[in-house]
Every structure is written in C-alpha cells, then in structure tokens.
C-alpha cells in the first residue's frame, strides 16, 4: 500500500511539472514607446542666417508641436486578442437573482426643477482666434519673390515682393493678393542701416493691412471682400530659399502701433522689443539645404583688425611687412 501511494505521489508531481505553463517573456509583453525630442529655445540676438536658393529655414516657438494628420487608425489589429472558444465560469443558473429590485424608490432623489451651474456659453472651450498679427524682420537680398509664409499649416499668409511693393496673399480665403506700396515718409532723417527693415500689420477686427519699410509706410488697405482673415495663432514662419541674409524675426499676435513699429525700425534704442508670439531671442529653427548661421554684420564690424589678421593668417606663415616713407619694405618684428 505504501509503495502504491509513493508511486501515485511521484506521478502527480511529474505531471504538475510537465503541465506547468511557461512564464511569458517580460520583454515580449513590455510596451514600446517612441522617444521624442523637444526643440530647445535659442537666443539668436547678434546672429544672422545666410540662405541660398537651395536651402530655406523654418522658425517656430520652442516646444511647439504642430498637429499631425494621420490617414490610418493607429494600433489597429485584424484579430481579437485573448479570444477563447468557451465561456469560462458559465453556470446554468443565475446566482443572486431576486424577483424584486432592491433600493427602488418611487421618487428621484436630489431632483431640482432648475439646472444648476448652467451657462449660456460652452465652458472650457478653446481660446478664440487672435484679432490680428504683426511680423517684423530684417533681410538682405538682390531679389526676392516669396519672402515667407506665416502659419503654413493653419490659415497660411504669404508675404512677397521687394522694397517698392509687397503683396499679401491668403490662400485659404482667396488667391487675390493685396498689394501695398511703402512710399510715404514715416519720419525724417532715419538712422542709416544696411538691412532692409520691413514690418506688416493685419487688423482682423477692422479688416485692414499696412506695410512699413525703413522710414516709409504704405496706405492702409481693406482686405479683399469675402476674406475675413483671422490669424490662427500658429507660431510658425517658413522662409524659402533665396540668396541673402536674414535676422531679427519677430511676430506679435496683435497689430502693432506706429510707436512700436518706429521703435523696431530704430533698433530698440528707446525700449527693448520682443515678439509676443515669436521672438528672435527665444526661438527654434529647422534649416534645410545650404544654410549658415553666423554673427551678423554689426558684430563682425566690431572685431579688431588684428584679430581678423590672426584668424586669416596661414598656420606657420610669416607676418606681413610694412612700407617705410622711403618706399622700402621693412620686416615687422617676429
């Protein structure tokens, strides 16, 4: 009898070991995540971007994530996971079944004839669109057809032209550009500047636009009929490729006053300026193609000549000589 019992216990232990389910691999069930990197904010004061016809640049507010449209449904599976052909724990009888409904009352508790906390407007909705937009920048170029596109993903606004005439286009509303000619003197005796300084303002409430270039301004023009342009607030501005330099890009989410435009044109000598939607002192940029970030012309002009000579002198080369009053070349001391 003891032998039979020992054999039965041994058989039960072996069967339990053989039929024990294998533990699932921890790496197989571990969810995978996609790591994303944030766009850091940079202070580009004193810097300029040299662009080319084969390269452009896009500026955005730091840590801004543009909306991504997807055509397919993510995490879609054609089969139903964990499907079983039998229903576990099935019973022929319904447990805890009662013929009467417990806790049943004939009246509705806490019922009021009025709706508390009711408002006529929908709370927690998205913020309304802005009432206008202003863009200011400095650039150098021989010729430019399309200068930039503001908010390319949502309600784009394109800005093109040159010193004599500029054009505003609203592709979402109409393809008829609005031409503005800044030829009216804004102030007398402007400070000299190598840059082409340009600002434009759009007032969505009044449906008017105006362009400033250097010390001149254009007339205020009504936007084309039927457009009713309202800036979407997307803090992105894209510059296509052109041969030249670009610096000091600022975007405000409201139409600038004349004093604010004048202060920008004068380089902020009266008050420091900073774009409320996009600022050159805290910005992210994504270059493409042939582009170069370097010190602007003002900083390059402040460098001492001796440092420039040391920078461009060949390694191991001898110092350049100098001429005396007699015309003979003298050697500089080594």
Image (cartoon, grey):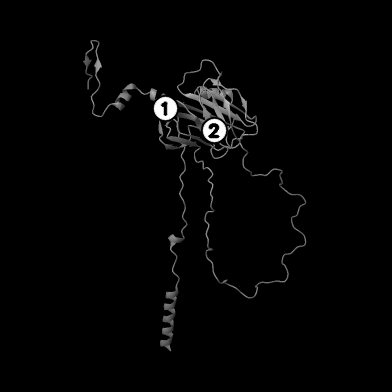
Residue 326 at x, y = what percent? 23, 10
Residue 147 seen in the figure: yes
The quadrant the N terminus occupies is: bottom left
**Up-down: is 279 above or below 195?**
below
Question: Which circle's residue, 1 or 2, is located before the other in the chain?
Answer: 2
The quadrant the C terminus occupies is: top left
Taking the view exactly as shown, the residue that stands out farthest to the top is 326
Between the residue at mark 1 and the residue at mark 2, the CA separation in whole angstroms equals: 26 Å
**In which quarter of the view is residue 168 placed?**
top right
Residue 310 at x, y = what percent? 29, 26
Residue 104 at x, y = what percent? 74, 64
Going 59% across and 30% down the picture, which residue do you hit? 202
Judge left or right: residue 9 versus residue 317.
Answer: right
- Judged by depth in the image, the label closer to the viewer, 1 or 2, is 2
Q: Which label sits on residue 314?
A: none
Residue contact at pointers 1 and 2, CB within 8 angstroms: no
Residue 275 seen in the figure: no
Q: Tag 1's secondary structure?
A: loop
Going 46% across and 24% down the picture, which residue do you hit? 195
Density class for disc 1 (Cα within 10 Å; few <14, some 14-19, many ≥20) is some
Residue 116 at x, y = what percent? 73, 48
Judge left or right: residue 77 versus residue 331.
Answer: right
**Up-down: is 177 above or below 193?**
below
Q: Tag 2's secondary structure?
A: strand
Dot 1 corresponds to which residue?
296
Going 33% across and 22% down the picture, which residue do you hit? 305
Density class for disc 2 (Cα within 10 Å; few <14, some 14-19, many ≥20) is some
Dot 2 corresponds to which residue?
158
**In which quarter of the view is residue 176 placed?**
top right
């Amino acid at each position: 009898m003891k032998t039979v019992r020992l054999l039965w216990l041994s058989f039960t232990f072996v069967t339990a070991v053989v039929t024990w389910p294998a533990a699932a691999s921890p790496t197989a069930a571990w969810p995978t995540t996609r790591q994303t990197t944030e766009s850091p904010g940079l202070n580009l004061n004193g810097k300029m971007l040299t662009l080319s016809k084969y390269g452009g640049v896009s500026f955005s507010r730091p840590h801004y994530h543009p909306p991504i449209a997807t055509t397919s449904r993510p995490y879609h599976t054609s089969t139903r996971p964990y499907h079983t052909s039998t229903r576990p724990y099935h019973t022929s009888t319904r447990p805890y079944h009662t013929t009467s409904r417990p806790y049943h009352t004939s009246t509705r508790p806490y019922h009021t004839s009025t709706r508390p906390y009711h408002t006529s407007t929908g709370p927690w909705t998205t913020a309304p669109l802005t009432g206008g937009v202003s863009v200011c920048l400095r650039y150098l170029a021989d010729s430019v057809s399309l200068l930039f596109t503001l908010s390319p993903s949502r309600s784009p606004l394109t800005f093109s032209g040159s010193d004599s005439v500029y054009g505003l286009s609203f592709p979402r509303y109409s393809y008829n550009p609005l031409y503005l000619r800044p030829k009216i003197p804004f102030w007398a005796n402007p400070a000299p500047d190598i840059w082409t300084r340009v600002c434009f303002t759009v007032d969505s409430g009044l449906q008017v636009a105006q362009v400033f270039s250097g010390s001149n301004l254009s007339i205020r023009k009504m936007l084309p009929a039927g457009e009713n342009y309202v800036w979407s607030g997307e803090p992105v501005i894209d510059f296509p490729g052109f041969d030249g330099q670009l610096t000091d890009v600022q975007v405000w989410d409201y139409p600038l006053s004349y004093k604010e435009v004048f202060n920008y044109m004068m380089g902020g000598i009266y008050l420091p300026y900073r774009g409320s939607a996009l600022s050159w002192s805290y910005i992210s940029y994504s270059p493409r193609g042939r582009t170069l970030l370097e010190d602007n012309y003002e900083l390059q002009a402040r460098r001492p000549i001796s440092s420039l000579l040391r920078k461009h002198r060949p390694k191991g080369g001898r110092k350049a000589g100098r001429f005396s009053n007699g015309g003979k070349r003298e050697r500089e001391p080594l």
